[in-house]
Image (tube, rainbow, N blue to C red):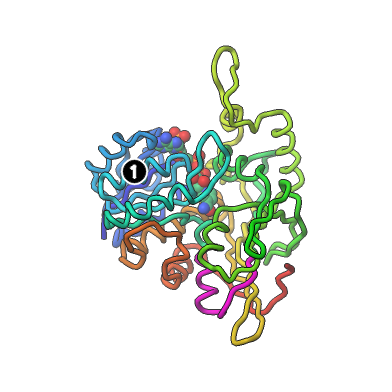
Amino acid sequence: MGKVLIIGAGGVGTVVAHKVAQHPEVFSEIMLASRTKSKCDDIAAAIGGNRIQTASVDAENVPELVKLLNSFKPELVINVALPYQDLTIMDACLEAGVNYLDTANYEPKEEAKFEYKWQWAYQDKFKEAGLTAILGCGFDPGVTSVYTAYAAKHHFDEIQYLDIVDCNAGDHGKAFATNFNPEINIREVTQRGKYWENGQWVETEPHEIHKPLNYPEIGPKESYVIYHEELESLVKNYPTLKRARFWMTFGLEYLTHLRVIQNIGMARIDPVIYNGVEIVPIQFLKAVLPNPGDLGENYKGWTSIGCRIRGIKDGTEKTYYVYNNCSHEAAYKETGTQGVSYTTGVPAMIGAMMFMKGLWKNPGVFNVEEFNPDPFMEALNLYGLPWHEVHNGDLEL
Ligand code: NDP
């Protein structure tokens, strides 16, 4: 049992707050803090029962964070603000002696390049302080990394080919919207493609490699190879991998909008002067796009995310597919948010629960596949993201 501080009150923060509040036997006291306190207050009111305290904090200001941590004294911070704030929150955790968990790796604002190197550099500091930092505990990264660890532990002697497949077959009824923070999302999906093959990274043009893949209960969807952050830690932690790729589905309409946004300069991350004021086009774009947190009400359909793995067991080649299908409508009914926020927020709560129960507690900085996958997999079935397995099916890859 212990206190937890959630930072970030967007779509994902809403789900984390709801799910953490459902477990008073694990999370004795909860505080939700973000830049805009009124958003925290609205979430706390929707949950009710005086379960959640709220506060305002600028997560880029270390002294402000340390002050909040020292006054509330949580065991763990769940960081579901933006990737830009990862390092300041980790610094504050070290100063105040608090453990740390996040769902997305650090990315500098001025360069659309996410990498673990900045956070892995905190390894010795967390170890010396006797504190645990759990990195990438959403769905992807997060559940996909735990799926891989579970497959390697129980179903293979050697995993050789990993394809993470992420399908959103939902329809929110808008011409264009992103499912999580638009700035972070557009920076991610417009970068060059990259995958791991035979000991090295292979780069592609954005969305160059694509093919239809069949998703359970959904059918065929055009899927594109993009670079995704869990590939970096998975190829390091599973050196037997000969190839590791990440596929994401996009509709033609979405890709057309994305191309136009890029072509007219609205995806730019460098400041431009407009009417004498400095603005960053992609940040301005975020202000006019639908808020991902508000998409839930009319969202229909499913997400389907999983790992398709080929490798060796007892001297023979086998395949394994493990996945979850999540209904946008069911997610909305439970938490008032759509499926992408839900599939990110539930694993963040489960990771926090693993830490609180002492199951994932080890001084240092860790990616989730470095912990025991079994209790996490069990919790996914109990708390809203049940998974399914297919042995020796056709992976299509
Ligand atoms: P939103 O933009 O909806 O929410 C972000 C929240 O962080 C907002 O409440 C925002 O405050 C707050 N915030 C931003 N800057 C600061 C700051 N300086 N200080 C304090 N609070 C701040 O994002 P999402 O909820 O969609 O995503 C949250 C995180 O989850 C992101 O890091 C995203 O990359 C990650 N993610 C991970 C996934 C995974 O599977 N691993 C999938 C999807 C998302 P304000 O309201 O004032 O703007």
The amino acid type found where label 1 is placed reads: Asp
Judge whether 311 appears above or below 306 on screen: below
State left or right for residue 58 relative to residue 320.
left
Residue at 65% in and 85% down: 316
In the rendered image, residue 46, in percent from the top left (x then y), is placed at 40, 44
Judge whether 91 appears above or below 280 on screen: below
In the rendered image, residue 282, in percent from the top left (x then y), is placed at 60, 31
Q: Residue furthest front?
A: 199
Tell me the magenta residue range. Answer: 145-162
Is 149 in the magenta? yes
Is 336 in the magenta? no
Q: Which residue is mark 1?
A: 91
Residue at 38% in and 48% down: 47
In the rendered image, residue 217, in percent from the top left (x then y), is placed at 68, 65
Residue 381 seen: yes
Quarter of the image for residue 395 reads bottom right
In the rendered image, residue 33, in percent from the top left (x then y), is placed at 35, 40
Residue at 76% in and 46% down: 252
